[in-house]
């Protein structure tokens, strides 16, 4: 009988190595997908820029870099400058677009160092803020979801540019998304949401006067009908085609707060005239409207018809502090309150 000691049992190494091999294979596959995705994004971006430049746009930027491995795709465009055929554009020291690598259908675009807005004949405005970003999702849909957001932003016109209506705002938000009917997207309609929170008007401008040197907030929502007609070579063409096709805003609802004054706004339908000015009626239920109209009457800005604002202020003063029903009418390129013209009607193109 042998007295040799028993050899210790050794676990098979395959059981230990297997998981590491699996992780390595998955990591290699994911890395391959990430680099393929990054290359596709850069290729499509270059092709899109070439196409737009041929269509009359002017797009310039520095060398594109793509980072973010392994879970994100981050595309940086230094010295980005985009100018549409209409003369409107945006420029930034850097634009950064990010998306999850597993969901390249949802992008967030930020301007970390601020941006400059070009307003055709009106000149350029520098915009800075805690956050300047835009998101776009559902890119494969007929109408993608868009969201634009400025947080604690300031607006400074460059020398020689026309004044900008506001000097700063706590929050600006605009969203568009397909209109839903019974939970299903409507064929040719877009819902639009706009929020302006705690805006301060430029010195001596109509916003500052209307807000009685306080802050102005505006919340608006509505639906754009005939949304597919919002296309053309420039801003005038976009809205002109839309107007000629019967495009209009429906179901408009909103709330305006200026200083101590407050108003609820409703309109069944608004459209644009041949010159691009808004056309239609807005019903207004106002609380203490007098200070707002009186402030506009004192505004030195040439945009406000001071004689009309004085008459409107006198007409609304009789209501005192009681809520009053008013009708704003956009016609003949002007904004009317009853018999009194206040200012040019908002211009779409």
Image (cartoon, rainbow, N blue to C red):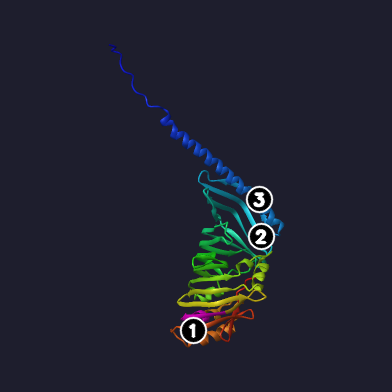
Q: Position of residue 156 (x, y in %)?
A: 58, 64
First in sequence: mark 2 vs mark 1 = 2
Q: Which mark is residue 325?
A: 1
Q: Is residue 344 above or below residue 3?
A: below
Gap in Å between the C-alphas at discs 1 and 3? Answer: 54 Å
Q: Which residue is mark 2?
A: 83
Q: Decide which of tag 1 and tag 3 comes sooner along the chain.
A: 3
Q: Nearer the viewer, residue 18 or 269?
A: 18
Q: Nearer the viewer, residue 170 or 247?
A: 247
Identify the residue at the far front of this view. Answer: 1
Q: Earlier in the sequence, mark 2 or mark 3?
A: 3
Instruction: Answer with the quarter of the image where residue 90 lies.
Output: bottom right
Q: Residue at x 48, y 81 (%)?
A: 285
Q: Is residue 306 above or below residue 16?
A: below
User: Which secondary structure lies at badge 1?
Assistant: strand
- In the rendered image, residue 31 lying in the magenta stretch gets the answer no
Mark 3 closeness class: few <14, some 14–19, many ≥20 residues within 10 Å: few
Callout in the foreground (2, 3): 3
Using the image, determine if residue 234 lies above or below residue 63: below
Image quarter of the N terminus: top left
Query: Residue beneath label 3, please?
Result: 46
* Image position, residue 11 (x, y; %): 37, 27
- Find the magenta span and give its range: 281-294
């Amino acid at each position: 009988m042998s007295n040799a000691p028993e050899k210790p049992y050794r676990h098979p190494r395959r059981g230990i190595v297997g998981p590491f091999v699996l992780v390595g294979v998955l990591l290699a596959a994911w890395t391959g997908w990430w680099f393929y995705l990054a290359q596709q994004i850069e290729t499509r971006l270059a092709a899109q820029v070439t196409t737009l430049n041929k269509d009359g746009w002017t797009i310039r930027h520095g060398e594109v870099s793509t980072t973010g491995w392994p879970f994100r795709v981050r595309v940086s465009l230094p010295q980005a400058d985009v100018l549409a055929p209409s003369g409107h554009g945006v420029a930034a020291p850097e634009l950064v677009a990010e998306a999850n690598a597993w969901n390249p259908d949802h992008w967030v675009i930020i301007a970390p160092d601020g941006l400059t807005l070009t307003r055709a004949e009106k000149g350029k405005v520098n915009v800075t803020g805690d956050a300047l970003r835009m998101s776009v999702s559902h890119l494969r849909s007929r109408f993608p979801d868009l969201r634009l957001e400025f947080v604690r932003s300031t607006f400074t016109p460059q020398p020689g540019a026309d004044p900008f209506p506001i000097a700063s705002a706590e929050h600006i938000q605009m969203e568009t998304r397909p209109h839903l009917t019974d939970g299903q997207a409507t064929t040719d309609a877009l819902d639009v949401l706009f929020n302006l929170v705690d805006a301060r008007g430029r010195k001596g401008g109509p916003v500052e006067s209307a807000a009685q040197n306080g802050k102005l907030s505006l919340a608006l929502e509505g639906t754009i009908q005939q949304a597919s007609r919002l296309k053309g070579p420039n801003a005038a063409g976009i809205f002109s085609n839309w107007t000629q096709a019967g495009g209009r805003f429906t179901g408009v609802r909103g709330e305006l707060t200026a200083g101590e004054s407050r108003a609820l706004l409703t309109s069944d339908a608004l459209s644009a005239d041949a010159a691009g000015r808004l056309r239609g009626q807005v019903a207004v239920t106002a609380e203490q409207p007098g200070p707002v109209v009186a402030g506009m009457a004192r505004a030195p800005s040439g945009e406000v018809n001071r004689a009309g604002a004085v008459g409107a202020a006198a007409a609304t003063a009789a209501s005192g502090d009681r809520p009053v029903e008013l009708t704003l009418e956009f016609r003949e390129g002007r904004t009317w309150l009853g018999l009194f013209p206040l200012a040019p009607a908002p211009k779409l193109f």
